Image (cartoon, helix red, strand yellow):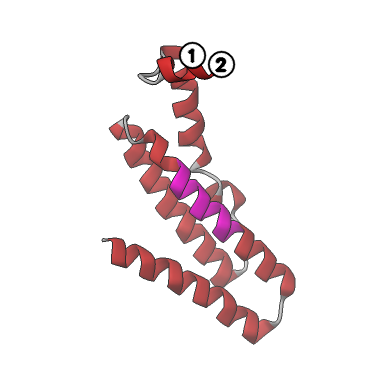
Amino acid sequence: MKALLIIAILATFGLIFFLYSRNRDGKKLAIALGSFIVLISLGIMGNITRPVIPLFLTHIVLIVSAWLGLLYYLVRGRYVWWLIFSPVVTIVIFVIWSLLAGSRYEDIWGSLL
């Protein structure tokens, strides 16, 4: 599974630069690379939702749909921003739940503050 994830990341990165070499559209390259970096970051930040399994699975589904949204932008040229940034919703929900209901890490935060 990890190998498939790495292949998908490298294939997307390669597709971005292949399409840039064909079209020489710098604006599309910048938007695609920015969205690519945001998706990788959201995928890594989504690990905080792992204690709540349904929320984590929702985050995984949203990451996959956001990745497909980026590929849609690369192929068709239509940027679907709400689909690409949709994984932010699960992270925000987890942070709000953690603030309202507490967390098992409250003692750590209390000692730091």
The front one of 108 and 92 is 108
Kind of residue indicated by mark 1:
Gly
The residue furthest left is 1
Instruction: Identify the residue shown where x is 66% and y is 70%.
Output: 29
Which residue is pictured at 55% across the width and 60% down the height? 36
Q: In the picture provided, is 81 more to the left or to the right than 13?
A: right
Q: Per the image, is 66 magenta? A: no
Check disc 1: other Cα within 10 Å, few if <14, some if 14-19, many if 20+: few
| Picture coordinates of residue 60, whole percent (x, y) | 37, 46
Q: Amino acid at mark 2?
A: Leu
Q: Tell me which segment is drawn in magenta.
A: 35-45
* Depicted 97 relative to depicted 13: above or below: above
Q: Are marks 2 and 1 in contact (CB under 8 Å)?
A: yes
Q: Position of residue 56 (x, y in %)?
A: 35, 38
Q: Which mark is residue 110?
A: 1
Task: Answer yes or no: is residue 106 visible.
Answer: yes
Q: Is residue 36 above or below residue 13?
A: above
Percent x, y of residue 54: 30, 33
10 Å neighbourhood of mark 2: few (<14), some, or many (≥20)? few
Residue depicted at x 51% and y 58%: 69
Q: Is residue 5 left or right of 26 when viewed as pictured?
A: left
Q: From the image, which quarter does the C terminus lie in?
A: top right
Kindly report the distance in space between the C-alpha atoms of the residues bearing marks 2 and 1. 5 Å
Does the stretch in magenta take in 40?
yes
Which mark identifies residue 83?
Answer: none
Residue at image position (63%, 85%) is 21
Please give the label number shown on residue 113: 2
